[in-house]
Image (tube, helix red, strand yellow):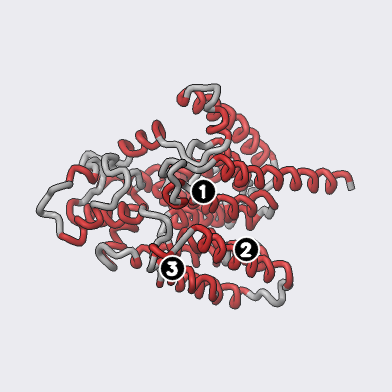
Amino acid sequence: MVAYIVLAWFSLRPELLSLTIYYGLLGICLFATLLVFIGVDEKTITPTRLLLWAACFRLIGLAGDPLWEDDFFRYLWDGYRFYETGSPYGIAPSMFFGDGNIPAQFYSLLAQINYPDVPTIYGPTLQYSFLLGHLIAPAQVWGLQALYALADMAMILLLLRLASARWVLLYAWSPLVIKELAFTAHPDGLGAMLMLLALYCRQQQQFAVSVTVLALSVGAKVFALLMVPFILWRLAFHYWAVFVSVLFVLYLPFLVHGTSDMAGLIVFARDWQFNSSSYALMREWFEPQALKLILGAVFIVIYAGLFWRHHKENGWKIPRGDIVFGFFLLISPVVNAWYLLWLLPFAVLYPALWSWTFSVTVLLSYSVGINLNSTEVAAFEIPLWILLLEYGAVLVAICIDLMRYKMKQNK
């Protein structure tokens, strides 16, 4: 806890924070978490203790400011535009540069938004959360931090219903989760929580609730589409209709204004690359669009195999989302650290060394030129040796997991 307090103190004084201090403090938090995970049993790690410590860590994050991130300026701006006009879509923030009608506190936000020429890419579910954050605390990030921390506590409660407290601890006390949600206010945790809730309700045969929540999750981020076939397959047609209807209702207020998130998403899908592995490696031999088609085709084949295997089993169980999201991220052109929030719930349900290793090494993606104060590395470029360390560790962990699996099968 002391390390998180120190990290919160540094977050309020970013001019004093270096990557060395940042990784050192997170390393202490990780070491303490692993020490508890290894050293105690199920009777000692009670859900109450786990939740109390998880809440403490998130409250500390709320007391701090976002670390190494500026995405929250866009969230706050979207909430403001939603409140003022009924839709944040369709108009890039740069269109408001020089607009004297913008209140000073929001003009200050406007000046710090990254990629201001690109319209917002965030789905309707997240836009409603941005609006709620605006109503709680206009132009203040703590409102969003509180919302997403509460959603994350709900995630932990769900996981406690599905897995042992010992494995849930790894998620609840994960430095990645606490950093990305409580400190940095990334909204992916909300979408991932809704996805897991949809899967849980499907398992409990609460089909109407499941497809409704699933639509909310898809409305948060397109990542949730990867779970749609697993949930909707073999359900009656009217449940499919409910899913589509809820998704339509989410978009309806924005469609009335003639706007949606598609303009920003198209730019994102076409142009952006960051912290990729397979994609970056294969760029040496293929053009970007051709490469995306090749990797997309490979993913579809793997995904179809997992889907077929899942539905051949007797009864319905929560799918291997760790493999689905893990493979998706390993071929994706963009792998931001907070994307792992979609994978980690499945890492609790299906523990493996590679997934938890990835949750640690992905934090190395903050070692970009601007944070390294490097004159040799571009502002948002990650040095090659960092990428090799990040994904090399994951590859080694995958090999160890495969060897363990083969040894288990041979017994």
Residue 369: % across, % down: 45, 46
Q: Residue at x 31, y 63 (%)?
A: 133
> Does residue 98 appear left or right of residue 268 in this picture?
left
Q: Which mark is residue 365?
A: 1
How many marks on residues? 3
Please name the amino acid that badge 2 sits on.
Answer: Leu
Badge nearest the viewer, 3 or 1: 3
Badge nearest the viewer, 2 or 3: 3
Label 3, secondary structure: give it.
Answer: helix
Q: Residue furthest right?
A: 411
Residue 205: % across, % down: 56, 54
Decide which of tag 2 and tag 3 comes sooner along the chain.
3
Q: Which mark is residue 170?
A: 2
Dot 2 crowding, Cα within 10 Å, few <14, some 14–19, many 20+? many
Residue 147 visible, this angle: no
Decide which of tag 1 and tag 2 comes sooner along the chain.
2
Please name the amino acid that badge 3 sits on.
Answer: Phe
Q: What separation in Å lies between label 3 and label 1 (alpha carbons)?
A: 20 Å
Badge nearest the viewer, 1 or 2: 1
Q: Residue furthest left?
A: 100
Dot 3 crowding, Cα within 10 Å, few <14, some 14–19, many 20+? some
Q: Which mark is residue 10?
A: 3
Please name the amino acid that badge 1 sits on.
Answer: Ser
Decide which of tag 3 and tag 1 comes sooner along the chain.
3
Q: Residue at x 50, y 57 (%)?
A: 19
Q: From what the image shows, is residue 163 above or below residue 280?
A: below
